[in-house]
Image (spheres, rainbow, N blue to C red):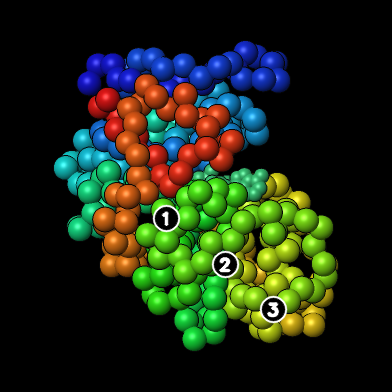
């Protein structure tokens, strides 16, 4: 490939703001160093990609940059003994699309240690339908299970339920037999969430007010993609010795909570980071995703767009207008 298509972001020397993202062609020489070159067939748009493309948060750490924190495709060149030409691979995180050129391109050059093999039963498009959002949902479910929660303990609340992390979390928890309460601002999406396995839908307005130190014990646990007051309210509603896996900040990065749930109910707050998660945990997460995530449900939460459409949807995901997951087909 002499030239290939990409989303390209620059910033002038000394300028505070980055230039608007462009859809353009570059050459392989424009890419950064890495042992493995991948022909990227699919990527996906996560919340963090929305922040990177719009420049609303300082996500990008170098310019020029290709955003896109996830990619999947086929190895075309490798100087690493771990990968050979023709291997199907995927990548989530590791600062790709932030400090190293990322997935919104038809070609990527990356470190071998960042790649994992595409699970045999999964297509590149399915891996990107999961993407960092879905893989993070899996990490959150694994964290709750390792903490010791099981379906017998009671219902699990999922906030930001119609979003990427939330939709996959609802499906995964339901598959394992948990009673799932979906907390959403889009109550009109009740059918969508029930089809994914939610038993109950709660308006997020109930979680938006000033949190009380302790509220009625409603949930054995939770997965929170929102932060801020909704997370503080959720913590106040967790039953004795329950736990919440916190993975997002779609509602804000503050946490206006008290210590009361922790010291009077023994509640635990489990932090989830997907970006630097070691390889063995990634492989465990993908093994579980391959077995637990119903492909029909995955298809039902996914919309496919072309690379040229990525810039247009960046603002939508930040505005909470994207339902489920967006897959990017780089050939389109
Ligand atoms: P999405 O935009 O797809 O979903 C976020 C959802 O949060 C929205 O769909 C909406 O759900 C809800 N929401 C949005 N704005 C608000 C608000 N102001 N108040 C309350 N709820 C709101 O994003 P993702 O699912 O991809 O990511 C969710 C969060 O998780 C992001 O903050 C992202 O950065 C973070 N994240 C963290 C990772 C980690 O490693 N820790 C990895 C992946 C994601 P609804 O309409 O149903 O209410």
Which comes before the other along the chain, label 3 or label 1? Answer: 1
Around disc 3, counting alpha carbons within 10 Å, would you say few (fewer than 14), some (14 to 19), or many (20 or more)?
Answer: some
Could you tell me how far apart the alpha carbons at marks 3 and 2 are, in whole angstroms? Answer: 12 Å
For marks 1 and 2 on the same chain, the one whose residue lies earlier in the sequence: 2
Query: Element type at marker 2?
Result: strand
Residue 225 or 94: which is nearer the viewer?
225
Q: Position of residue 280 (x, y in %)?
A: 40, 65
> Residue 72 is drawn in which quadrant?
top left
Which residue is label 3 attached to? Answer: 217
Q: Name the residue located 68 percent from the left edge and 54 percent from the top edge.
A: 205
Q: Which label was assigned to residue 307? A: none
In the rendered image, which residue does mark 1 sit on?
191
When the figure is inspected, residue 75 is found, relative to residue 115, above or below; the finding is above
Q: Nearer the viewer, residue 300 or 145?
A: 300
Toward the left, the furthest residue is 86
Residue for point 69% across, 59% down? 206
């Amino acid at each position: 490939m002499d030239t290939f298509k990409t989303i390209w972001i620059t910033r002038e020397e000394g300028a505070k703001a980055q230039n608007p993202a462009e859809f353009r062609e570059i050459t392989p020489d424009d890419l950064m160093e890495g042992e493995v070159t991948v022909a990227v067939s699919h990527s996906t748009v996560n919340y963090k990609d929305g922040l990177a493309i719009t420049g609303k948060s300082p996500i990008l750490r170098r310019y020029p940059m290709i955003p896109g924190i996830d990619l999947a495709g086929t190895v075309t060149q490798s100087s690493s003994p771990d990968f050979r030409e023709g291997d199907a691979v995927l990548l989530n995180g590791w600062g790709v699309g932030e400090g190293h050129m990322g997935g919104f391109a038809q070609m990527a050059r990356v470190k071998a240690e960042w790649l994992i093999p595409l699970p045999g039963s999964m297509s590149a498009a399915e891996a990107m339908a999961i993407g960092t959002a879905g893989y993070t949902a899996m990490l959150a479910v694994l964290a709750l299970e390792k903490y010791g929660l099981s379906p017998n303990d009671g219902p699990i609340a999922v906030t930001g339920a119609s979003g990427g992390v939330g939709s996959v979390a609802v499906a995964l928890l339901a598959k394992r037999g948990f009673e799932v309460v979906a907390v959403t601002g889009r109550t009109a999406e009740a059918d969508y969430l029930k089809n994914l396995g939610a038993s109950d839908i709660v308006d997020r307005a109930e979680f938006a007010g000033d949190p009380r130190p302790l509220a009625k014990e409603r949930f054995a646990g939770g997965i929170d993609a929102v932060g801020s007051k909704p997370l503080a309210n959720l913590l106040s509603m967790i039953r004795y010795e329950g736990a919440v896996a916190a993975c997002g900040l779609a509602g804000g990065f503050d946490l206006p909570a008290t210590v009361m749930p922790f010291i009077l109910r023994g509640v635990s707050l489990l932090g989830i980071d997907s970006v630097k998660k070691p390889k063995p945990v990634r492989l465990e997460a993908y093994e579980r995703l391959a077995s637990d995530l119903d492909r029909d449900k995955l298809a039902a939460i996914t919309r496919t767009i072309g690379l040229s459409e990525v810039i247009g949807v960046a603002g939508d995901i930040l505005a909470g207008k994207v339902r489920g997951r967006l897959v990017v087909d780089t050939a389109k």
